Image (tube, rainbow, N blue to C red):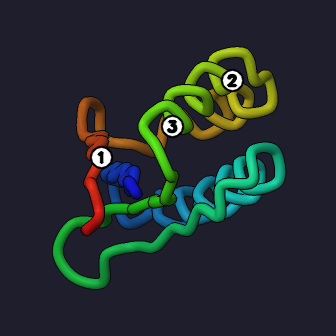
Amino acid sequence: MYRFIRTATVKNAAALPSALAFASEVTAHLNRSYSLNMRFGVEQFGCANIHWHFDADSLDKMQQVNEKLMGDRDYAALLTKYQDIWVEGAMHDAVVRLA
């Protein structure tokens, strides 16, 4: 089993409500379209980071989802709509093999 984790940093506190709206919308879209059971959360202290994660049985499954996302117009529209709320270059992805 593998866990995909994405972390993105919000530009400032004023952008946090928009970031949470994006997180909710994109999570709902990905769960509805790809049956991911993705969840998200926001750090409580320190940086205004949003975290998303979902589990998959294999790396191939994660790759298949990624390939489908490249052609997903609704996903691309969400990215464009909320593009100005994130710190440039502050997104980080990780894949963890679960024991």
Q: Dot 1: within a 10 Å radius of its alpha carbon, few (fewer than 14), some, or many (20 or more) residues?
A: some
- State which tag comes first along the sequence, 2 or 1: 2
What label does residue 9 carry, if any? none
Q: Is residue 24 left or right of residue 39?
A: right
Q: CA distance from mark 3 to mark 2?
A: 10 Å
Q: Residue at the spot x=30%, y=46% of the render?
A: 95
Percent position of residue 14, x then y: 45, 63
Q: Are marks 3 and 2 in contact (CB under 8 Å)?
A: no
What label does residue 68 carry, if any? 2
Question: Circle 3 — which element?
Answer: helix
**Residue 44 quadrant:** bottom left
What label does residue 95 carry, if any? 1
Q: Residue at the spot x=38%, y=53% of the render?
A: 2
Q: Are marks 2 and 1 in contact (CB under 8 Å)?
A: no
The quadrant of the rendering that contains the C terminus is: bottom left
Question: Circle 1 — which element?
Answer: strand
Q: Residue at the spot x=74%, y=45% of the render?
A: 34
Question: Circle 2 — which element?
Answer: helix
Percent position of residue 4, x then y: 40, 50
> Mark 2: which amino acid?
Lys
Q: Dot 2: within a 10 Å radius of its alpha carbon, few (fewer than 14), some, or many (20 or more) residues?
A: few
Q: Are marks 1 and 3 in contact (CB under 8 Å)?
A: yes
Question: Which residue does the numbered mark 3 point to in the structure image?
Answer: 62
Q: CA distance from mark 2 to mark 1?
A: 18 Å
**Residue 59 quadrant:** top left
> Mark 1: which amino acid?
Val
Q: Is residue 96 left or right of residue 63?
A: left
> Mark 3: which amino acid?
Met
Percent position of residue 11, x then y: 34, 49
Percent position of residue 97, x then y: 27, 55
In depth, the one of 21 and 64 nearer the eye is 64
In depth, the one of 66 and 76 nearer the eye is 66
